[in-house]
Image (cartoon, rainbow, N blue to C red):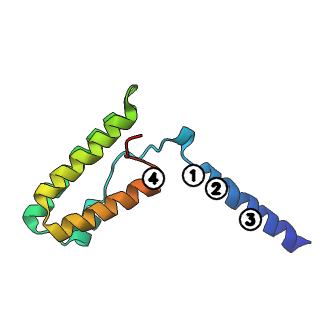
Amino acid sequence: MKKLGLTFVAALAFSASVFAAEPQNGTSKWDGSINKAKLSQYLQLSADQNEKVADICDYFQVQMKSALNAKKDNEQQVRNAVYGNLKLMKKTLDEKQYSNYVRLMAMTLRNKGINIEKK
């Protein structure tokens, strides 16, 4: 009986934590923050690229915060922030690095529940 009670409590706690993590009213509140040290290591950036990528990441975070706080055309502003980020990264990274970055960004957006496709 004791094991059954503990199992029930564990299942209840797990399900509550899963539902608590769901984004509210279909929108995610990811502010665009990126761990620059891990990104630099993953993409194997040169010193010059590292500085430029850090600036692009900071700019992207500002744009995402602005887009999420917008009262009107929120989704369009998020889309513009993401595509602007990808455009700047394409100028900074080589082909292989950019390919890896796009894959990483797509996965991050999907995990955060952000859909940038036009409806």
Residue type indicated by callout 3: Ala
Disc number for residue 21: 1
Q: Which residue is situated farthest in the top direction here?
A: 71
Q: Residues within 10 Å of mark 3 (few under 14, many from 20)?
A: few
* Foreground: disc 1 or disc 3: 1
Percent x, y of residue 91: 11, 56
First in residue order: circle 4 vs circle 2: 2
Query: Marks 1/3: CA distance?
Result: 17 Å
Contact, CB < 8 Å: mark 2 with mark 1? yes
Where does the C terminus fall, quadrant-wise?
A: top left
Residue shown at 12% from the left, 58% from the top: 92
Q: Residues within 10 Å of mark 2 (few under 14, many from 20)?
A: few
Q: Which residue is situated farthest in the right direction here?
A: 1
Mark 4 lies on a secondary structure that is helix
Q: Residues within 10 Å of mark 1 (few under 14, many from 20)?
A: few
Nearer to the camera, 26 or 29:
26
Mark 2 lies on a secondary structure that is helix
Residue with the mark numbered 4: 112
Percent x, y of residue 33: 33, 51
Residue shown at 27% from the left, 42% from the top: 81
Mark 1 lies on a secondary structure that is loop
Question: Does residue 2 lie above or below 63 as drawn?
Answer: below
